[in-house]
Amino acid sequence: MDVRAAVAHQAGQPLTIETVQLDGPRAGEVLVEIKATGVCHTDAYTLSGRDPEGLFPAILGHEGAGVVVEVGAGVTSVKPGDHVIPLYTPECRQCEYCLNPKTNLCQAIRPTQGKGLMPDGTSRFSLGGQPILHYMGTSTFANFTVLPEIAVAKVREDAPFDKICYIGCGVTTGIGAVIYTAKVEPGSKVVVFGLGGIGLNVIQGARMVGADMIVGVDVNPSKKAMAEKFGMTHFVNPKEVGGDLVNYLVDLTKGGADYAFECVGNVTLMRQALECCHKGWGECIIIGVAGAGEEIATRPFQLVTGRSWRGSAFGGARGRTDVPKIVDWYMEGKINIDDLITHVLPLEKINDAFELMHEGHSIRTVVTF
Ligand code: NAD
Ligand code: DAO
Ligand code: ZN
């Protein structure tokens, strides 16, 4: 079938809106009509050419929501008409990783997903007979896409696509890092570095679980008001801290953070986030994705004395199990997504979404089809 897609032909070039061809779903796959997609920093990172794993030509996008249109042979968990959120972290419920409660990193389709291909090693997208690659197993910058059955979460049908698409990445990454990765306890002191689309969701997750003190750290003071709305209790602008930022945060939290989250992707902040944690038990969760080849450093004594570094991908969430619950939380008014979606654009204007992001004008832009 013909579909309308924003195609990334080359790194560093704007996306072009084109009609491309999409083959139907094969065994174990589903065809989904994408109704809305968020534009995330990871799409921009890949498009910029800085992502060493970025492949072109490809259809980017990994934060979508839509409706199942057709299913391939053997698909049992969804049917045409079901509302779904594509999952860049699938959940097969059978692999060694899915069977280990310590991780959400299902590996069932990892080798082909990383190559921009479906599990059978081919692409469903093409243009003029030449294959176009999938991206993160999702390719939501198209009005129809094909996904493995294990990479869709079935969600309730009364939830609006233009809001719940954000649960496909940013919301789940931030809230999940608090709930599933760190398991923050009520009464905790939390420090959040970076108050963007991820950090604000960490903040609302920390508020949800009853953290007492939620400190937000950002060099952009215009982030303060929104972060306060989401539960931040104290704002720190590193540019306004006279002395050492780590000492300042340890003093502010009266001994250090129980949990610190790095939501920027800056290795200097990753060190500060570890070192502002409380001696004996403080945990630093790395969410931000640093540039290719960058490394983190600290004095090993920081770890010997009980602080720890951990990472979190997709908030530690198991997509098919946890994403429907997060959609329920939104529909029950337990989490706020509406205020984080600052812009809505049609597919034809998708390149404007990247510009808004680069200029720091948006938290999340959603593209509708
Ligand atoms: P964003 O650009 O919306 O937010 C980043 C924030 O950091 C901005 O408010 C900016 O002002 C602030 N900032 C920049 N430099 C700073 C500094 N030196 N000190 C303090 N604050 C600083 O980005 P985002 O969408 O929130 O994404 C954050 C990171 O999370 C990115 O690296 C992204 O790739 C990553 N990410 C990770 C996962 C995962 O599963 N681990 C998922 C999605 C995104
Ligand atoms: O299993 O090796 C693997 C890959 C897991 C991918 C998790 C990606 C999370 C961070 C990237 C940002 C996503 C928007
Ligand atoms: Zn698995």
Image (spheres, rainbow, N blue to C red):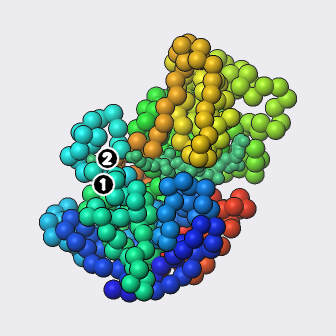
State whether residue 171 is above or below residue 33: above
Around disc 2, counting alpha carbons within 10 Å, would you say few (fewer than 14), some (14 to 19), or many (20 or more)?
Answer: many
Q: Position of residue 226 (x, y in %)?
A: 66, 51
Name the residue: 31% across, 69% down: 122
Q: Within the image, what quadrant is residue 118 found in?
A: bottom left
Name the residue: 34% across, 58% down: 112
Name the residue: 54% across, 82% down: 17
Instruction: Please identify, in this view, whether the residue under mark 2 or under mark 1 is nearer the observer.
Output: 1
Residue found farthest to the front: 130
Left or right, 28 with respect to 302, comes to left
Q: Is mark 1 within 8 Å of ligand 3?
A: no
- Residue type of the residue flagged with mark 1: Ile
Q: Within the image, what quadrant is residue 154 found in?
A: bottom left
- Residue type of the residue flagged with mark 2: Cys
Q: As rendered, which of 158 and 67 lies closer to the eye?
A: 67
For residue 78, the mark is none
Label 2, secondary structure: give it. Answer: loop
Left or right, 241 with respect to 228, comes to right
Residue occupied by mark 2: 106
Residue occupied by mark 1: 109
| Contact (Cβ within 8 Å) of mark 2 with mark 1 | yes
Q: Is mark 2 within 8 Å of ligand 3?
A: yes
Q: Position of residue 190 (x, y in %)?
A: 58, 31
Tell me, yes or no, if residue 208 can be seen here.
no
Q: Position of residue 132 (x, y in %)?
A: 43, 74
Label 1, secondary structure: give it. Answer: loop
The quadrant the N terminus occupies is bottom left
Q: Position of residue 273 (x, y in %)?
A: 63, 31
State whether residue 280 is above or below residue 348: above
Q: Within the image, what quadrant is residue 348 found in?
A: bottom right
